[in-house]
Amino acid sequence: MQIHAISLHSKPAAVLAIAAALAFGFPALTQEQKAPPAKAAKTSPSDQSMQDRILTLQLSVRELESRVAELQMTARTSDSSGRNYQSVISSLQSTVASQQSSLQSLQMSVQSLQNAVASLQSRVHASTPAPTDPQAAPE
């Protein structure tokens, strides 16, 4: 996302609007999405590693969300001369880009985990014998 340059000295309200759009244009994860994945009774080392990676990425996203909130507060409390707006906007843009990168990485990890689950399910299905029909058995 690109933001075109505007005169910060003449339009502090516009700058705040842009900061808000940046911050609210990328909604935070819902609580349901933030919950750590349920652990199975037995997890392979690769599954555990993937779960650890997902948890690490979720923590990174939460830290970035906190940073965005801090920057929003700074933008709201900056004086009307627009002195701090440019640095706040720049910092917000970088924070949002970082958050997008973390979310993309998290999505790739989830996709990888889903592929692993599908693979395991197909192996279980292939190794499970077909059920016998009790009515077809001779009496």
Image: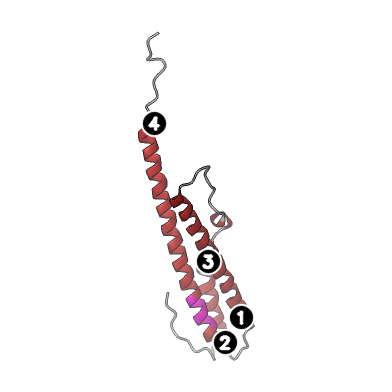
Instruction: Indicate whether 36 appears above or below 69.
Output: above
Amino acid type at mark 2: Asn
How far apart are labels 3 and 4 at the CA level? Answer: 41 Å
- Where residue 42 appears, x then y in whole percent? 50, 43
Q: Tell me if label 4 and label 1 are in contact, CB under 8 Å.
A: no
Of pointers 3 and 4, the one earlier in the residue sequence: 3
Q: Quadrant of the C terminus?
A: top left
Q: Quadrant of residue 4?
A: bottom left
Please tell me whether the stretch drawn in magenta is mainly helix, strand or loop: helix
Residue topped by disc 1: 74
The residue positioned 54% from the left and 82% from the top of the image is 88
Amino acid type at mark 4: Thr
In the image, the segment drawn in magenta is 88-94
10 Å crowding of disc 3: few (<14), some (14-19), many (20+): some
- At numbered mark 1, what does the secondary structure look like: helix, strand or loop? helix
Q: Is residue 44 left or right of residue 35?
A: left
- Closest to the camera, between mark 2 and mark 3, is 3
How far apart are labels 2 and 3 at the CA level? Answer: 26 Å
Amino acid type at mark 3: Ser
Residue topped by disc 2: 84
10 Å crowding of disc 4: few (<14), some (14-19), many (20+): few
Q: Tell me if label 1 and label 2 are in contact, CB under 8 Å.
A: yes
